[in-house]
Amino acid sequence: MAELLNPRPTPPDDAPRRPRLGVLGAGQLARMDQQAAIALDVDLRLLADGPGDAAVLAGAEALVGDHGDLDVLRAFASGVDVVTFEFEGVDNALLQALVDEGHRLVPAPTAKLFAQDKLHQRRGLGDAGFPVPPFEQARTPDEVAAFAATHGWPVVLKAPRGGYDGRGVGVVDDVEEAAAFLEPLPDGALVEPKVVIEREIAVQVARTSDGRSVAYPVVETVQHEAMLRELVAPAEIPEALAREAVDLAVAIVDHIGATGLVAVELFVTPDGLRINELAMRPHNSGHYSIEGAVTSQFEQHLRAALDWPLGSTALVAPAAVTVNVVGPEDGSDPRSRLRDALAVVGAHVHLYGKGARAGRKLGHVTALGPDVATAKRIAWRAVDILEGRA
């Protein structure tokens, strides 16, 4: 029997019924969903792995259970109006079973699959004429070599499912390295050329079930060791390119029929925009919106999931910069330096309640400013303190 943590008190009989939204997952994204839900008087229930999950520690109501167990998913879905997500890793067949039994999922499993399966995404979007990089499915080292014979070494190999923050992705220079990457993947990998990337950008799109949508300004994302380290809003790119990126993101979301909040990650290459990945949920590339936009991505996600009016995506300052707080190499806890970081005027610190570990994403800092340089200086000053460099 699944355990219920932080149960909501029974409301008075004359209290108006509040919408109840279910989120599969209870990490930092659900924690920030919970903050938005409080302001909107929405009851949030999460499916958690255990009492130590970030959102559970913050007081969100949570059912503890295995998201790979259909009976657990049924019990969870039966207690909420709408089911949505904070991560991709729920078996799509189980999600479809919930839909077949009459539960409403945001997004639907048919759309969610575009974020869960990279091969499915490349094939579906490529067949529809969207700009995906050249790709093949490679099951053997010889198939990788044949692809490289056309496109050149090195090539990029990606596990079709399960990768995030650079996990499940490898750049290989020869057949031997390809064989080592493919060895644990019985269904093979997605193989692509190593494209020249001038910038990495992202667009957040929110869409309701009746097709209403809004898009946030394009942001630039800066990766370090396969993890988003810094983002700049708005991206410092030509206006025409920004319009093209927003139009492309909205067209993708409409084409696949996604609902809720979708992050469309794109590469800027010498040959134009190329699709990188999709995330069907709030995403690290939208964290700046908590302080930096009229409507945060988390509030927007709740609005879209409940088919409520969508909020303004306009920035509230000329520039916003977010920097992730990463566990220092010495294993120290940034929380021990929080007091000093809060002395940085203009720095908005978010810590996720996660145990400190070197290289682990533990929080983020956002700063607003009259220009990118000012916002960046403030955000990094606070992060340097939190990570023990200042």
Image: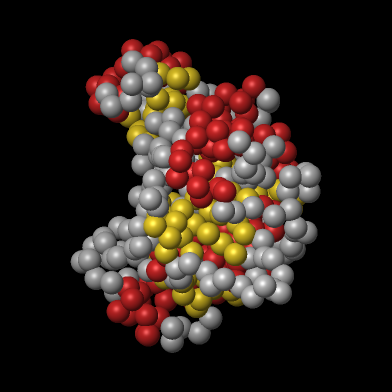
Is residue 254 found left or right of 362 in the rendered image?
right
Q: Picture coordinates of residue 33 (x, y %)? A: 55, 62
360 over 154 or under it: above or below = below
Is residue 385 found left or right of 291 in the rendered image?
left
Q: Is residue 279 visible?
A: yes
The residue lying at 62 percent from left, 28 percent from top is 125
Q: Picture coordinates of residue 42 (x, y %)? A: 63, 65
The residue lying at 53 percent from left, 81 percent from top is 346
Which residue reaches farthest left?
A: 330
Across the whole image, how many numbered discs are drawn on residues? 0
The residue lying at 78 percent from left, 44 percent from top is 211
66 over 285 or under it: above or below = above
Which residue reaches farthest front?
A: 13
The residue lying at 35 percent from left, 33 percent from top is 171
Residue 213 vs residue 106, the one in the foreground: 106
Which of the 4 image quadrants contains residue 248? top right
Q: Picture coordinates of residue 140 (x, y %)? A: 33, 15
Residue 311 vs residue 365, the one in the foreground: 311
Residue 100 vs residue 328, the one in the foreground: 100
Q: Picture coordinates of residue 87 (x, y %)? A: 48, 48
Scheme of colours in the image? secondary structure
Q: Is residue 317 visible?
A: no
Is residue 341 found left or right of 281 in the rendered image?
left
Q: Quadrant of the C terminus?
A: bottom left
